[in-house]
């Protein structure tokens, strides 16, 4: 049996395996914007239970996570965020 490594550093580092592609092909999908994608809902519920949180939010990319973080901290027009020049979000 061969073990494969899943690298979660980036959205694009690890390529999907044949099994992953088959699972994506066979899954039941909906529109997560309207809250009716059963796979996303199941994932969010499973992770909320795992982390003992009231709820979780699936975000498909690191860029989206960064934007949500910035908007959470700078929610008013004219707000600003001070970052180090080596900050992940800045880079």
Image: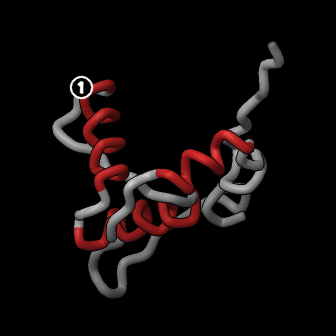
Question: Looking at the rendering, in which quadrant would you find the N terminus?
Answer: top right
Which residue occupies the extreme right position in the image? 2
Question: Looking at the rendering, in which quadrant would you find the C terminus?
Answer: bottom right
Q: Position of residue 2 (x, y in %)?
A: 83, 18
Question: Could you say which is closer to the camera, residue 21 or residue 73?
Answer: 21
Q: Which residue sits at x=74%, y=42%? A: 17
Viewed as shown, does residue 11 lie left or right of 48? right
Viewed as shown, does residue 43 lie left or right of 65? left
Q: Which residue sits at x=24%, y=63%? A: 36
Which residue occupies the extreme bottom position in the image? 77
- Tell me where residue 14 sits by quadrant: top right
Question: Could you say which is closer to the camera, residue 83 or residue 46?
Answer: 46
Q: Position of residue 40 (x, y in %)?
A: 35, 52
Image height check: is 45 above or below 33? above
Q: Which residue sits at x=44%, y=57%? A: 59
> Which residue is the site of mark 1?
52
Image height check: is 33 above or below 58? below
Question: Could you say which is closer to the camera, residue 25 or residue 68?
Answer: 25
């Amino acid at each position: 049996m061969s073990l494969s490594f899943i690298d979660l550093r980036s959205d694009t580092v690890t390529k999907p395996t044949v099994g992953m592609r088959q699972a994506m092909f066979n899954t039941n999908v909906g529109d997560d914007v309207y809250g009716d994608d059963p796979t996303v809902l199941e994932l969010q519920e499973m992770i909320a239970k795992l982390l003992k949180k009231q709820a979780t939010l699936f975000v498909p990319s690191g860029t989206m996570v960064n934007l949500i973080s910035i908007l959470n901290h700078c929610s008013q027009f004219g707000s600003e965020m001070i970052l180090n020049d080596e900050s992940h979000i800045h880079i």
